[in-house]
Amino acid sequence: MPYAFHLVPKATDAAARVQIHDSILTDALRPAASSSTAPSFSPEDVFELWCEPQAVFRVRAVGRCSATLSGHASPILCCSQSPTGRYTATGSGDATARVWDMETETPKHTLTGHKGWVLVVEWDGREKLLATGGHDGQVRLWDPKTGQAAGQPLLGHSKWVTSLAFEPVHLVSGKNYSPRLASASKDGTVRVWNTGTRKLEFVLSGHAASVNVVRWGGENVIYTGSSDRTVKVWSGVDGKLIRTLNEHAHWVNTMALSTDFVLRTGPYDHTGKVPKDDDEAKALALARYKAQTANQPETMITGSDDHTLFLWPEQASSSFSSSATPKKPIARLTGHQKQVNHVAFSPDGRFVASAGFDNAVKLWEGKTGKFVASLRGHVAAVYRLAWSADSRLLVSASKDSTLKLWDLKTFKIKTDLPGHTDEVYCVDFVADKVVSGGRDKTVKM
């Protein structure tokens, strides 16, 4: 198994770690002697060399644009790759969503029905359902194989839909595979739907303003972040409030779980094995989730307009016991000079990346929240981030019309990915291809 090595400087103002690639001499001592910004070491220092396992597989580095696909008549606002990486879904201001085949790099289906911008697209972990949410307040379900609507739209929100989250594969109950779906809205509520019956199961009401993000965790808890400055944790069983976390001083814009990648990809891993039925899929998904949380329980990070992030401990312990005293955060992450747009855990949980309006991408330790590095290169706001499956590559999408692929050994740009002619609003990275979309109405792979 490959390992990554690093030192932890004692100075409190230093970065949290010094990466060791060749030797302590070349990677720590020589830079310290020649640079005023590198951590300093004294002859009496005792080095503790830390090691962390890395993915046993390696994702091929992205080097060039292999396809530019047109079809949308308005800017592309969101994109999401399917759990296997075989398909990509995009949502646009032209009131349509589209499904693209990543292997042939061709359009597959156009999904029509929304009466306004399609703001969010989300795949279920078995790649059997695609959900879209729009400015019209509707949530629609689709069969990605045929491109046909899977029943009538799910109606109930009085304002636009901001975020969608499917129930993780290993939690789905019943003989027929029908994962539930949580939809968050500008109207301040989250609605949980049964996708099999198209019926509303319960409403999570308690936020005093727009709910901007929703996540469905692997312990069957639902996390919501709102413009009322709070994060709420709910039981996925009955919708009861577990606790409210209210450390942020402004809107909560973004949220990520340390288990996001294994939950979104369900039973599918780098081997390409396809489960023969739903029971095997649930077993594989559960095994992957348990492996992910064996050494680190499911943790959450939230980002806000107050320029900060908070790293939170496990929220689902003690059998959903509701506590009047909310769990305190592990760390408050400061460094961004403007609003935080997006935050994402690496698939292995070792790192967290955050993007902001200050043109910066910042890296933090996933367990402690300690600062690791600033990735500088964008000249305008950074909108979205995406990690490779092996956690070795990070790609960022920006208002400056570029994507940048970052080398996490040197914390410098590995590959500049130009090609878009205007702002890049969305990016995703599941298998070995990056997909992006933006204001120029094109999808690039």
Image (cartoon, rainbow, N blue to C red):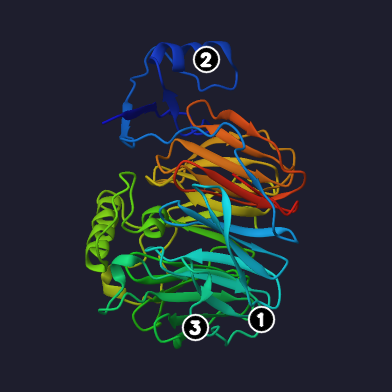
Tell which of 356 and 398 is nearer to you: 398
Question: Is there CB contact under 8 Å for labels 3 and 2?
Answer: no
Who's the residue at 54% across and 63% down the image? 247
Question: From mark 3 to mark 2, how far is it between C-alphas?
Answer: 62 Å
Residue 34 in the image, given as x and y percentages of width and height:
57, 11
Residue 259 in the image, given as x and y percentages of width and height:
38, 55
Which residue, given by chain and number where applicable, does mark 2 sit on?
31
Which amino acid does the dot numbered 1 rest on?
Lys
Q: Is residue 304 visible?
A: no
Instruction: Give the secondary structure at mark 2.
Output: helix
Question: Is there CB contact under 8 Å for labels 1 and 3?
Answer: no
Who's the residue at 52% across and 60% down the image? 255
Q: Examine the rendered structure and indicate whether residue 212 appears above or below residue 65.
A: below
Which residue, given by chain and number where applicable, does mark 3 sit on?
151
Locate the N terminus by quadrant: top left
Mark 3 or mark 2: name the one nearer the start of the chain: 2
Q: How many marks?
A: 3
Which residue, given by chain and number where applicable, does mark 1 sit on?
159
Q: Is residue 163 visible?
A: yes
